[in-house]
Image (cartoon, grey):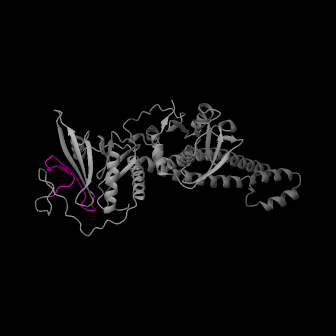
Amino acid sequence: MLKINLEGIYQICDDLNKKVSHSFITNIVVVNFSDLLLSFSFYSKEKLLISLNHQNPFLGFVDKQYSPHTVLGGLNDHLRKYIKGAYIDSVEVVNDDRILKFNLYKSDEFYEKQSYTLILELIPTINNLILLNSNDEIIFAKHYSDLTASRPIIKGMKYSPINKNTSMSRGSFDYEKYSQEIRDYVVESDHKKQKEQVLPLYNHLKQKEKSLKKKLKVLEEEKEQAQKNFIYKEYGEYILTYSNSLKELNEYIDTIKDQYDTSISPNKNAENFFNKYKKAKRTIENVDREIIKGHHDLEEISHYLATFDYLANEEILVLMNKYLPQKTHNNKKEAVDASKPYYILINNIRIGFGKNKDQNNNLTFKLANKSDTFVHLKDSHASHVVIFNENPTNDLLLYAAEIALLLAGKEDGELQVAKISDIKKGPEKGLVLLNKYQTITLKSIRNETKMLIKSQKRFN
């Protein structure tokens, strides 16, 4: 993360004043021990992320779709009590250093205006969040210090800022790069948090994937060995063929003497060879069924793992009930219709997508119109993506293509784009045949799309 310098703190302050001054703080979410999120009344395009990271504190605007659950406790309670619903009059840089001062006003229960100050000290290793009353007395601090400290932070004491860093020059600051790094941070931390919450399920699926691969390898070896036993059919047929010529029979028996039982008759040997062949044939039939099932299970598990970060809550619950029922509070399966596909909204236009054969089939051949646009990862049994629009913009096509890649667990690839009218059902459910299509190639996926897919909803 790009460290904030003096130029950076002034650019951040200017951006804050442009976007959120003269707004109300409508919601506060304490994401974790170091991060919190503010929402605003008159600026609803984004939310403000404040990270009091020990080594590199920062703040900046993030996608409004980012909606984690709040962590209860002292920080949450104090912020909600004093600044939720507060009016932001202005934001200032304090002491020409990496300290921001939010000047706030809030009406009390008697509708009298009370002034508060939110101080953010964004200095590595000594960062802090401090709330002050109208007399600049400390109401709350994330980090307190006692009277022996060079700058005591004690409840009820007058606030004094950190001594100015005279060696700090203004320098240059790439605000656009800094803002992108914050967006990347949100995506990464959101994925990490989701994985931590359902880590037992993720680990179970990884172990199951490993076990299935091992099982398929054993089955293939078993099939290969059984196929070698097809030679017994040839042994039996040759013995019966030479049964009327003792000389030819003896000459052939000499070639298979390691397999031939001299204690029984030639006909009995032939019968035993045919039985071994039939057993090998039955083994292959059984093994083939197991291999087909194993590949189906492996494809399903691998798909869940590839798209684990983008599974909807109901999908996680169903998977927990299916694979780890002992880990859920409610072992009774939720009544979730697995045939209903999902969608997101871009400028009030739906982009639908399926995550299994039934969802793909219903999306493309039941919900979509003939004039809608179909997007699919080329040469892959992947998710169907449909833009519910006849002439989608390049932006819509980009979102749809990125979603198709995400649901295939890929970061780049070649994709097919076609009209629904140019698609026919394939030999199996969920498979399609394209009469006419165009191709587009993507080299990367934007983080905003990775966040946006988390707002997925199901078709009714």
142 with respect to 387 (left or right)? left
Which x, y percent locates residue 185?
40, 54
| Quarter of the N terminus within the rendering | bottom left
Q: Total marks drawn? A: 0
Which x, y percent locates residue 105?
22, 42
Which x, y percent locates residue 254?
80, 62
44 with respect to 378 (left or right)? left
Residue 4 appearing in the image? no
Question: Residue at point 63% right, 50% down?
Answer: 440
Does the magenta run of residues contain 141? yes
Question: Residue at point 64% right, 37% down?
Answer: 429
Which x, y percent locates residue 342?
52, 37
448 to 427, vertically: above or below: below
390 with respect to 272 (left or right)? left
Question: Residue at point 33% right, 55% down?
Answer: 12
296 to 459, vertically: above or below: below
- Residue at the extreme bottom: 167
Q: Quadrant of residue 332?
A: top left
Query: Which residue is nearer to you in this view: 460 or 66?
Result: 66
- Residue at the extreme top: 460
Range drawn in magenta? 122-145
Query: Which residue is nearer to you in this view: 36 or 195?
Result: 36
Does the magenta run of residues contain 237? no
Q: Quadrant of residue 79?
A: top left
